[in-house]
Amino acid sequence: MTFITDLDDLIRHRHGDVKKLREIRDTVRHDNFITTEDKNYIESLITMHLKNQPLDKSLSRKQPDTKIKLQPKPTLSSPDLKNSFAIAEILELPEDIKNYLKNVPPDKDLSIDILESITDFIYKNLSKGDYIWIQTEYGITFYIVDFALNNAKK
């Protein structure tokens, strides 16, 4: 960018004394002359207002063309669990509970009946040393983990 272009930008964006900047610009264009005091004044304004600014302000408001591809949360399949943790048997929840957990309504309170049916299933089917793999909505996960920790079979 040239000195005159920067000077025009200072005037257009009203940085500094606009009247004085116009007089300096006219003198530079007409006489091809500038005083040291005026030059220092303009350079200080350029440094303060124009340095490190995007060349085209309209581009700075434009949304980036970056696209983010969202991946579903990874899940471990039964064979992965068995191989990773040396699991002999996997017990699955009853279908009605699994279907509810797949479609937890975000705008409604959690069903205490469903939560109790999950905790009943855990209490009846698990033994000392068993593990629980929990992968669901955060509130339900917390509830089940809290239940499991407080009701672990010793």
Image (spheres, helix red, strand yellow):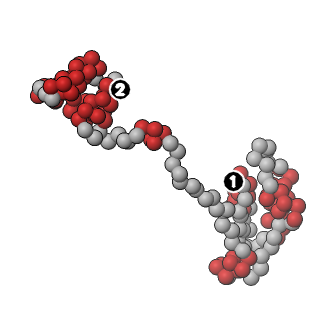
Residue that extends furthest to the left in the rendered view of this protein? 36
Q: Residue at x 71, y 64 (%)?
A: 134
Local packing at callout 2 (Cα closer than 10 Å; few below 14, some 14-19, many 20+) is: few
Q: Residue at x 69, y 72 (%)?
A: 76
- Identify whether 106 is placed above or below 89: above
Q: Answer with the quarter of the image where residue 72 lies.
A: bottom right
Nearest to the observer: residue 61 or residue 32 = 32
Does 41 sit left or right of 87 as displayed? left
Residue at disc 1, secondary structure:
helix
Does 3 sit left or right of 139 as displayed? left
Q: Residue at x 80, y 55 (%)?
A: 103
Nearest to the observer: residue 50 or residue 104 = 50
The type of residue carrying mark 2 is Arg
Q: Answer with the quarter of the image where residue 44 lies.
A: top left
The type of residue carrying mark 1 is Tyr
- Identify whether 132 is placed above or below 16: below
Q: Which residue is mark 1?
A: 138
Residue at disc 2, secondary structure:
helix
